[in-house]
Image: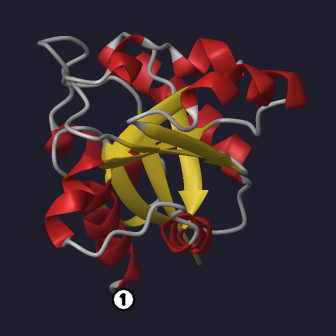
Amino acid sequence: MNTYIALLRGINVGGNKIIKMQELKAMFEALKYEHVCTYIQSGNVVFESEGASASGLAGTISQRIQETFGFEVPVIIRSLEELEAAIAGNPFPQSEPEAYKRLYVSFLAAEPAAEALEKLRPYEDGADKVRVIGRELYAFYEVSVSESPLFKVSFDKLLGTVLTARNWNTLNKVAALARKP
């Protein structure tokens, strides 16, 4: 069995695309995934599956959400190993634990093309910093996400791929949940 993390984009935000975690868990179990657990309302699901590809899992889950809940939700899948690598690859290590509240990781559906990465260059080294490493975009905000000029930048459009962001705390809690036997 392989451990995967499904990261759903845009559910339970501002009263839109409401999915109760108990119903989401039941949907995953109906797909015959095992050891399913969710973390907070933003669409983080840890589960186990035998021998499926990440892209196949994402398509299956997205289609079932459409059928079950009646709306489209992009789903990004990472294996536990990929999630661990994303945590280890953080280009913005902090000495103060409080600073991690301003660190976010966006998980990309696909690795951006070189041309897309060039479009990102103007955003890399301001007061707020951004880096793309593989299929992850790391953002460290000087003050906060909502006060950042980057808040209005559509990184998904800029990079040409679907993405979903998680704060550092959530990311580490999901990883800890996935590590449990």
Q: Nearer the viewer, residue 51 or 120?
A: 120
From the image, which quarter does the N terminus lie in?
A: bottom right
Quarter of the figure with residue 132:
top right
Can residue 161 be seen at all in this image of the molecule? no
Q: Residue 81: x, y in percent?
A: 60, 74
Locate residue 153 relative to residue 112 in the image: left or right.
Answer: left
Camera sees residue 7: yes
Residue sitting nearer the eye, 3 or 143: 143
Quadrant housing residue 93 = bottom left
Identify whether 110 is placed above or below 92. above
Classify residue 41 by image quadrant: top left
Q: Is residue 87 above or below residue 71?
A: below
| Residue lying farthest to the front in this orientation | 126
- Residue at 25 percent across and 15 percent down: it is 17
Tell me: residue 11, above or below residue 79: above
- Residue 85: % across, % down: 59, 71
Left or right of 162 in this view: 175 = left
Q: Residues within 10 Å of mark 1 (few under 14, many from 20)?
A: few
Q: Which residue is situated farthest in the bottom direction here?
A: 181
For numbered disc 1, what is the local secondary structure? loop
The residue lying at 51 percent from left, 64 percent from top is 90
Position in image of residue 69 (x %, y %): 31, 18
Circle 1 sits on which residue?
181
Which of the two residues, 15 or 90, is positioned nearer the viewer here? 90
- Please state the horizontal and vertical placement of residue 122, each as a whole percent of the image: 63, 23
Type of amino acid at the residue the image marks with label 1: Pro
Q: Residue 23 or 115: which is nearer the viewer?
A: 115
Residue at the (50%, 13%) spot, across then down: 154
111 left or right of 19? right
